[in-house]
Image (spheres, rainbow, N blue to C red):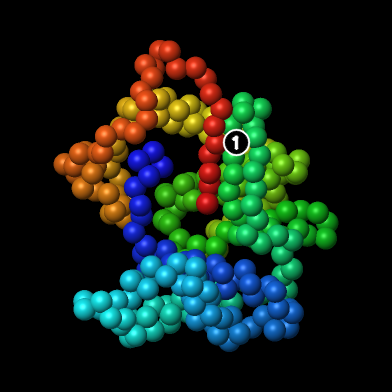
Amino acid sequence: MIDKLPEKPSAAATRGTVVHAVLERLFDTPAPDRTAPRARAMVPGEWERLLAAKPELAELFAAEDGAQDPERLAGWLREAEQLVERWFTLEDPMRLEPAERELYVETALESGLTLRGYIDRVDIAPTGEVRVVDYKTGKAPAPQFRGDALFQMKFYALVLWRLRGIVPKRLQLVYLGSGDVLTYDPQAAELEAVERKLLALWEAIREATETGNWRPRQTKLCGWCDHQALCPEFGGTPPPYPLKVIPAQSSPASQGRMDQV
């Protein structure tokens, strides 16, 4: 975000975008028509819609000579269709009427920090309980790593709580890659702890931004990064820092925002 280095499009991320679009738009159809064959048939159309908006994605399925590789594209579409079909083994869209889909949420905390993000689906029971649902096209993490995934959901729960005054009854992660559903019922005290953690995290980000002192840390996620050649952890040299550096001791407290997608 600081250096504004472009991210290369990936087949996995693009597939996730297409699958999310199918699961969102399927609810535009009457409940009896929300079938697996219908959803599967929507995949090519959603891909074409995305391609029209981002023509550069065609490069994902180009052969070495630059020409389109129809077999590669067909295989990729089949994988997306399989993820969509798996959803029907985890939830029944005929029995669901989401209150919100792809909901943009934004709220400002008392500290001035703005939180914002997009929630895949919000369900509201007739009795008023709120369920927050997020689709993941990858596989469910091992139990020891589920805390990171749940932190994202608690972020959403915190924003909704601050916006609407209601703590969501349930947080639900739907992993289409492995066919797992992870649920969690948050409490207000937990969300208050999340808020404190976000404030501490933002303070660390603000200080690093103003001083230019960003400390690299190698993790398993580094394998997904396009910028290892610029990272000191891999022997690289970052580009010149684009912002004015302010000595840490004279940096005033400031407002800011944190995005979650």
Image quadrant in which the N terminus is located: top left
56 relative position to 30: left or right: left
The residue sitting at 64% across, 32% down in the picture is 109
Can residue 157 be seen at all in this image of the molecule?
no
Residue 206 percent coordinates (x, y): 45, 28
Along the line of sight, the residue nearer the viewer: 45 or 119: 45
Residue 236 percent coordinates (x, y): 19, 42
Question: Residue 89: which quarter of the image?
Answer: bottom right
Identify which amino acid the numbered label 1 is placed on.
Thr
Most extreme residue toward the right, as rendered? 127
Can residue 108 be seen at all in this image of the molecule?
yes
Residue bearing mark 1: 114
Residue 19 percent coordinates (x, y): 52, 71
226 relative position to 181: left or right: left
> From what the image shows, is residue 190 above or below residue 73?
above
The residue sitting at 53% across, 47% down in the picture is 260
Most extreme residue toward the left, as rendered? 235
Along the line of sight, the residue nearer the viewer: 255 or 173: 255
Which secondary structure lies at badge 1?
A: strand
The residue sitting at 73% across, 53% down in the picture is 130
